Image: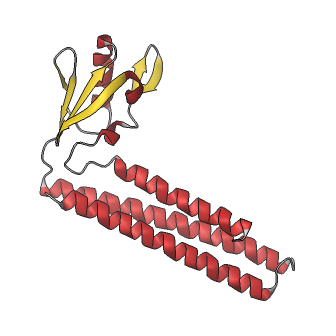
């Protein structure tokens, strides 16, 4: 594959990976420790990832346990969870923080599916923008007589096939996540 094509394909792949990461933070009724991945805790004045200051485990389907390495971090971790957009109320026994996930309501599930679709649409737009950029690069090369008209058409077709592949991948990921959310 042409080096330029490889570069644009790689950018599209990164867009899909970013979407997968975003989806891992959307809760679907079950406790998922990845929900806490973006959470930062004030650790001696430094914002630190929760996983670097505590042990995070999922003992039951709708419970996450957070066991800080130092007991004085409990207040900081609770504060980070309350200030986040997770909508969870932590409870602690002095050693462990317990996050219990309530059953999602039908309305909340539908809102989450809308969010999933919106994020997928954003990823598709990003992939299409990469396609546009690729076509512009090849068009300039064609005008500068660096590539022939046939090569230009071939590159344009290849970029479209790559784009179609990643759009289909985004659709599949979106459908899977939507099903996961709507499954009670």
Location of residue 131 in the rendering, given as x and y in whole percent from the top left corner: 61, 71
Q: In this image, 81 relative to 22: left or right? A: left
Front-most of 54 and 27? Answer: 54
User: Could you say which quadrant of the image residue 42 lies in?
Assistant: top left
Q: Residue at image x 13%, y 42%? A: 102
Location of residue 41 in the rendering, given as x and y in whole percent from the top left corner: 39, 24
Residue at the farthest right position: 145
Instruction: Look at the image and tell me in which quarter the N terminus lies.
Output: bottom right
Residue 90 visible in the current orientation: no
Residue 92 visible in the current orientation: yes
User: Could you say which quadrant of the image residue 101 lies in?
Assistant: top left
Residue at the farthest bottom position: 150
Q: Is residue 78 above or below residue 3?
A: above
Instruction: Look at the image and tell me in which quarter the C terminus lies.
Output: bottom left
Location of residue 149 in the rendering, given as x and y in whole percent from the top left corner: 78, 87
Location of residue 161 in the rendering, given as x and y in whole percent from the top left corner: 56, 79
Q: In this image, 3 relative to 83: left or right? A: right
Q: Residue at image x 72%, y 66%? A: 4
Q: Is residue 3 above or below residue 149?
A: above
User: Could you say which quadrant of the image residue 7 lies in?
Assistant: bottom right
Q: How is the image coloured?
A: secondary structure
Q: In this image, 122 relative to 86: left or right? A: right
Q: Residue at image x 41%, y 55%? A: 20
Q: Residue at image x 45%, y 62%? A: 122
Q: How many marks?
A: 0
């Amino acid at each position: 594959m042409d080096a330029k094509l490889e570069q644009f394909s790689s950018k599209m792949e990164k867009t899909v990976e970013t979407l997968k990461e975003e989806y891992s933070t959307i809760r679907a009724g079950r406790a998922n420790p990845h929900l806490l991945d973006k959470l930062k805790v004030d650790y001696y004045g430094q914002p630190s990832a929760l996983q670097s200051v505590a042990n995070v485990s999922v003992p039951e389907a709708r419970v996450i346990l957070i066991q800080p390495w130092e007991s004085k971090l409990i207040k900081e971790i609770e504060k980070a969870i309350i200030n986040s957009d997770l909508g969870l109320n932590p409870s602690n026994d002095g050693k462990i923080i317990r996050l219990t996930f309530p059953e999602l309501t039908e309305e909340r599930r539908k809102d989450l599916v809308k969010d999933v679709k919106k994020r997928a649409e954003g990823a598709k737009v990003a992939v299409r923008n990469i396609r546009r950029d690729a076509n512009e690069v090849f068009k300039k090369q064609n005008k500068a007589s660096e590539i022939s008209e046939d090569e230009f058409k071939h590159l344009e077709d290849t970029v479209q096939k790559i784009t179609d592949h990643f759009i289909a991948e985004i659709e599949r990921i979106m459908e899977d996540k939507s099903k996961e959310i709507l499954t009670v």
